[in-house]
Image (cartoon, rainbow, N blue to C red):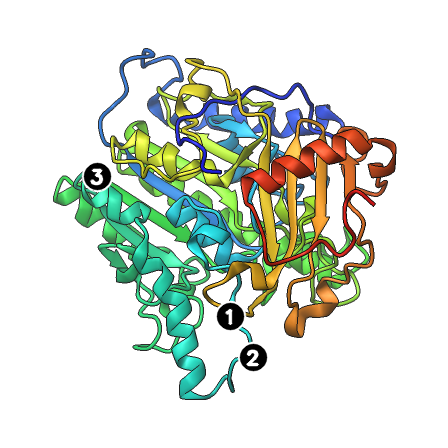
Amino acid sequence: MTMSCFAASGPTKLRTPSRPRRFVHRGIVLGCLFYLLAGGANASAGDVSAGDVPDRPNIVLIVGDDQAWTDYGFMGHPHVRTPHLDRLAARSAVFPRGYVPSALCRPSLATLITGLYAHQHKITGNDPSLELADPNSAEYARWRERLISHIDRVPTLPKLLAERGYWSHQSGKWWEGSYRRGGFTHGMTRGFPERGGRHGDDGLTIGRQGLQPIMTFIDEAVGQRRPFFVWYAPLLPHSPHNPPERLLAKYRDKVDSIHVARYYAMCEWFDETCGALIDYVDQKGLTRNTLFVYLADNGWIQDPGSPNFALRSKQSPYEGGVRQPILLSWPGVIPPGWREEVVSSIDLAPTLLSAAGAQVPQNCPGINLLPIVRGQQRLERTTIYGETFAHDVADVDRPEASLLFRWAIEGRWKLLLTYDGAVGRHASVHPRTDQRPQLFDLHSDPHERNNVAAEHPELVERMAANIAAWWPVTERKTLTRWKE
């Protein structure tokens, strides 16, 4: 079933369930104070009327890499300091119940750039399965190229924005070959086969080694009077967790695990780079006509006993893997505030394209959030959907071959269905020990400890039918049929 890009959806009357609301609001209040002391970017939320939206705003998309939805000051974390993102949150429409449909870097990023679910754009995992060929062979290189080629057959944000005169710059994580294959006019990643890079090559230096390439690009775009789109997706706080000692020192005595301390310091290091980018746009006098968007590509729960992630985070359909706060900041156009609606990263492509006056593809399943955050309409959509595939792609043309979970969230309820797709070398990340349908009440059980499917069979049946209608899968079976 294909949903209209302009379908509406209704606010869910739920509070952020994992922490007392006062802690989350504390981060927002502090961010507001910092923002006002800094001059408020010389713009207020009420400067633009409902029908008066600036033409062709600059767009800055900041994408964190492997960070839990809880690990920000504005989300109330007791230790992690993110003052720059807190200030951005203070001037943003904040969706604390934002989600990504896939909890793995490559498919999640492909969804951002295409506005499609992984089963639609077919980039479902990070790498072709090692069972297809020797990873050092020419045959495996052909499988890699085949997987990359899926980006060539669909419109992307940079391609569609170019039709409106935008220049675009890629930096950071980018798996789909050269930046040019994504439609970017400028960028850092040379990609396979020119560079042989797997997921960013030259682009992965951004943030960790400064922001000069982005700053140069912004200067050139401004000089040519071009609206611009910045894709800033650094390898941060992603491993290697090697933060500067000055940051690590802040966390050594706050936690018992050096691995957790390093991860927290990486979150703050990433925040510093976000602040540098936001400040540069402000120093250029561009903030008033710039739409900032923030989210992370997937979650991460640090294993205190090793440098690795814990289960039920990255690569999983649980909240630790897929829940991600989403920030939308456009001073004078988007009123700042805390939003209760459940939204998805699938909504960002139609939102950004609509802001730019660009064409939104007809098969785009997301929703333009601008009328929602500006109070022009209510969100009538009642359900969001997601899917989990194996890290390694068993069949680069058939997403079903690697399907492990499908899930849906309807208000307070979340349903997970488990499938028998090929797992490959990362089987330990997907134990799939509970093969029954898993239903969680996110309001009372935000960490998904209590499966209440047996207590709500009619709800399970209805939500499972909605999942089947969203993406009919005929080649895979649930490991235990949901009616049993």
Query: For the residue labelled by badge 3, is the local secondary structure a helix, a strand or a loop?
Result: loop
Q: Point out which mark residue 227 bears.
A: 3
**Identity, as a three-letter code, of the amino acid under mark 1:** Asp
- Asked which quadrant contains residue 179, the reply is bottom left
| Residue at figure coordinates x 59%, y 63% from the top left | 402
Q: Is residue 11 above or below residue 178?
A: above
Give the farthest residue toward the left.
224
Residue 183 image offset from top left, x and y in percent: 26, 54
Decide if residue 211 is on the left or right side of residue 366: left
Do residues under tags 1 and 2 come within 8 Å of each other at their CB atoms? yes
Q: Is residue 300 above or below residue 25?
A: below
Q: Is residue 263 above or below residue 337?
A: below
Tell which circle, 2 or 3, labels the residue nearer the N-terminal end: 2
Residue 69 image offset from top left, x and y in percent: 63, 42
| Residue nearest the viewer, comparing 356 with 337 | 356
Q: Quadrant of the C terminus?
A: top right
| Residue at figure coordinates x 44%, y 30% from the top left | 367
Tell which circle, 3 or 1, labels the residue nearer the N-terminal end: 1
Q: Is residue 18 visible?
A: no
Spatial separation of the CA atoms under disc 1 and disc 2:
8 Å
Spatial separation of the CA atoms under disc 3 and disc 1:
34 Å
Q: Nearer the viewer, mark 2 or mark 3?
A: 2
Q: Point out which mark residue 183 bears.
A: none
| Residue nearest the viewer, comparing 163 with 134 | 134
Q: Would you call the spot at circle 2 few (<14 residues within 10 Å), some (14-19), or many (20 or more)? A: some
Q: Which residue is mark 2?
A: 130
Q: Point out which mark residue 127 bears.
A: 1
